[in-house]
Amino acid sequence: METIKANYKIIIYLSIMFIISLITLYNADYINISVSGIIYKQLLWYLIGIVAIIFIINLKNRIIINYSFYLYIFLNIILLLLLLFGDTINNARCWFKIPGIGTIQPSEFMKIILIIFISKYIYKYNKKTKNKSMKNEFIMFIYILLILIPPCILTFLEPDTGAVFMYLILTIFILYISGISKKWIIIFFSILLFILSFIMFLYFFNINLFIKILGSSFFLRIERLTNWVNTSGMQLKNGITAIGTGGIFGNLFINDLYFPEAHTDFIFAVFASNFGFIGCLFLIMIITLFDLELINISIKTLNKTNKYIIIGFVGILIYQQIQNIGMTFGLLPITGITLPFISYGGSSLLSYMIMIGIIMNINLDNYHYHN
């Protein structure tokens, strides 16, 4: 019975975040951001997400897991087509435009399939490999890197560095709980550190070569990082000011500050400005309870593949929450990461609704297993 209650709790938390999202998007209009039609589109995407949850629950997860390889290949092809035929928005080719609906961002759905595909592979590896020697773990580690490389390269070229970081984060979470030697996680971090160090070296000592190899768009993204280090930039300063003006109880509809992407990247600043410190505590409490409920489901899940899948989902969910709220306060660099279920975003919102559908399905499987 507890498993059924868990699904009801998830629905309650989602409903609260849905209401908060619509109210905050409406309030974004008072920070000189035109949100004409965005509220209705957000409502539409939530309804599409609900349909997706119902569909997944009836479809059953095993079908998605069994066909994860073909879905992985399909999405890589879509990412390649995106580079060739995608619409350019803000100097990036991350979206396909769909008339009457908006845009679709394939990288948001790739993270779902990566979690499922990698989880399935690790489970099969652990089941078949009795002797977990360094050689066998090395083969598994290389195989996972080979899974990661194509979507990372294709997504980086869009460029969408935020999505690439999510691919890496979800892999680290799954590897950590898979039982693999911690040496490989250290090696994984070391590779990332080397790549980042090389990029920063080019940025500071050879800008022309940096732009030639990585492009001007990525150069601007690094500049956003240095702005964060120097606590500069209009978007960050106005975002922090908006949070400060919220006070204890907020100033509903009263704010003349302007900063780009208030309805997406800086949605928390809009919420804090209008609902103040008390409102922020309430929102963070709802987010925390929601995350804990998902973690509790993963603890009760006996099937290893399903457990890895939930941990992967929860990992990137928590990463996005911390990153989005942290960058709004200037504690973390601005990376264009949205706040799940609160920020405006069709693909992002739909991808997380699909994840929730899969988790609720796993929870129902737990119920049937125990009964």
Image (spheres, rainbow, N blue to C red):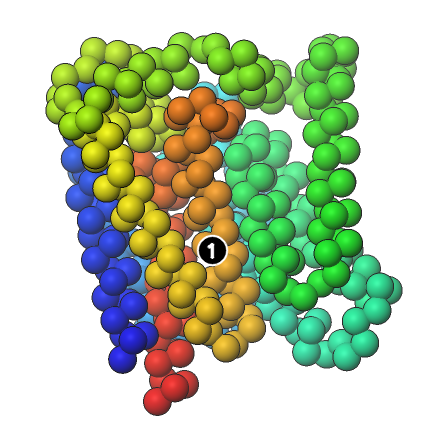
What quarter of the picture does the C terminus occupy?
bottom left
Identify the image quadrant of residue 136. bottom right
Bin the neighbour count of mark 1 within 10 Å (Cα to Cα): few under 14, some 14-19, many 20 and up: many
Report whether 186 appears left or right of 133: left
For the point 55% across and 71% down, the residue is 305
Residue 57 placement (x, y as % from top left)? 33, 70
Residue position marked by numbered label 1 in the rendering: 313
The quadrant of the picture occupied by the N terminus is: bottom left
Q: Identify the element where label 1 is drawn.
A: helix
| Identity of the residue drawn at 56% across and 73% down | 304
137 horizontally vs 19: left or right: right
Looking at the image, which is closer to me, 104 or 368? 368
Residue at the location (25% across, 54% down)? Answer: 13
- In the rendered structure, the answer to whether residue 255 lies left or right of residue 121 reads left
How many numbered marks have been drawn onto this rendered protein structure? 1
Residue 146 drawn at (x, y percent): 73, 52
Q: Which residue type carries mark 1?
A: Phe
The answer, for residue 163, to whether it is visible in the render is yes
Which quadrant of the figure has residue 55? Answer: bottom left
* Residue at horizontal 27 percent and vertical 48 percent from the top: 286
Residue lying at the far bottom in this picture: please name it.
371
Q: Nearer the viewer, residue 114 or 282?
A: 282
Which one is nearer the viewer's eye here, 359 or 290? 290
Is residue 368 shown above or below 141? below
Q: Is residue 153 above or below residue 317?
A: above
Q: Which residue lies furthest to the front in this view?
A: 248
